[in-house]
Image: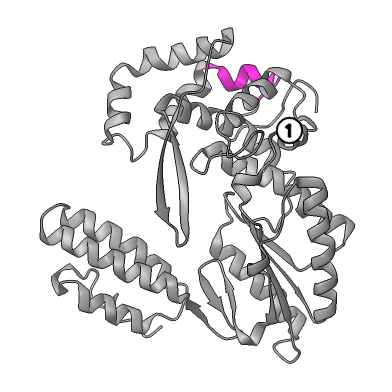
Amino acid sequence: MNNTATKSMRGGDIIGHKIFDEIISAKNIFRAWNQFKCGKLKKQDVAEFSINIEEALLQLSKDLSSGSYAHGPYKDFYIEDPKRRHIFKAMVIDRILNHAIFRVLEPIFDKKFIYDSYSSRIERGIHKAHERFRQFAWKLSRNNTQTVWVLKCDIRKFFDSIDHSVLLKIISKTIDDMKVIELLKSIIESHTTCPGKGIPMGNLTSQLFSNIYLDQLDQHIKINLKIKNYIRYADDFVILSRDKEELLHYLSIIGIFLKENLSLSLHPNKIITRKFNQGIDFLGYILFPHLTLLRTRTRRRMLKAIKILKIKYDSKEISEKAFNQSLASYLGMLKHCRSHKIKIQINDIISPKLLAPPGSYHSSS
């Protein structure tokens, strides 16, 4: 790609402008703010930042143009999702810049990604990955008449292990605007787990960076190894085959590729090879040929969270509207699996008057 980008931003083309100029333009930064602020204006840091928003955003654009921009510090905390994750939250101004960068670069890179990469992409996601998994499984099994083996892998400490120099080298193959590379370098190097490694979970750009990094693996698997039945979501991936030995052969090759090209390794305790009809634990659900179940840990975490929500509602810490909104997000997860028993458990936790719409918690699905 040369120093101009065409058709790289949704909602309009970039024609005849350097990518860096488009990222730092006041128009792009104000649009990034409008996207970023949705659902956040009641948060103290965002509310305080919004008081002099026009001045602050114009100053950001000027600082980026002059080269005086410097990434600020992070606040860190942990979430259970369901495993414990260390999240790093940047200052508001830096998060807005993340959105501005993402708006311009994501469309450029997304069209290069393979179809079966499902994390942090428009019209993808967990349930689309599950649908694709079943398409592969039913085709291979010839409508469940033949055995299908599944290799499931997880990359060990993925975000903490991303090599900054390798990531920037990969990006430079597509973006040759050095001002963009220097800006991305300042963001990438704003966080380290050890010298030269690690990107923060929490940055919007980290979602894009992770897909750019692992696209090297995706392309190797699809083009060099010519594996058709492959699905990746973040640092989890599966390969389906009728031949177990074939999967073990691929496992060895993939392990070598990750180590030699991306400084990554597979988690030795999370490499699983089993038959599809035994159930595959993938992205929070257990997939069987004829049904989908919620993972036990996910179910327990959900029930615990709903109990806490109910306590907060009873003590008036949250409104009925807030309670029902949170509850609805959990119920949304249950639409994709057999959930009659857990809906009964949820019904036992909460007050009947909060059940809306009527009957939605008593589905026989």
Q: Going by the image, does 252 lie left or right of 195?
A: right
Instruction: Relative to 280, say whether 157 is above or below.
Output: above
Estimate the x, y position of residue 60 in percent, counting from the top left. Answer: 47, 15
Name the image quarter holding the N terminus: top right
| Render colour scheme | one colour
Asked if residue 316 is positioned above or below residue 27 in the image, the reply reads: below
| Kind of residue sitting beneath label 1 | Ser
Q: Secondary structure at mark 1?
A: helix
Q: Is residue 16 magenta?
A: yes
Residue at position x 19%, y 64% in the image: 310
| Residue 252 counted in the magenta span | no
Q: Quadrant of residue 248?
A: bottom right
* Residue extending farthest right: 224
**Furthest-bottom residue in this view:** 145
For the magenta stretch, what is the residue range?
14-25
Q: Residues within 10 Å of mark 1 (few under 14, many from 20)?
A: some
Q: In this rendering, would 301 be left or right of 19? A: left
Query: Is any atom of residue 227 visible in this view?
Result: no
Q: Is residue 3 visible?
A: yes
Residue 179, position as x, y percentages in the image: 68, 17
**Residue farthest to the left?**
315
Residue 256 place in picture, x, y as percent: 83, 57
Mark 1, residue position: 165
Res 344 → quadrant: bottom left
Residue at position x 69%, y 63% in the image: 231
Quarter of the image for residue 205 reads: top right
View extreme (front): residue: 194
Q: In the picture provided, is 252 more to the left or to the right than 326?
A: right
Q: Nearer the viewer, residue 8 or 284?
A: 284
Q: How far across and down, in percent of the image, does residue 173 sit?
A: 80, 32
Instruction: Check the picture and name the quadrant holding the C terminus.
Output: bottom left
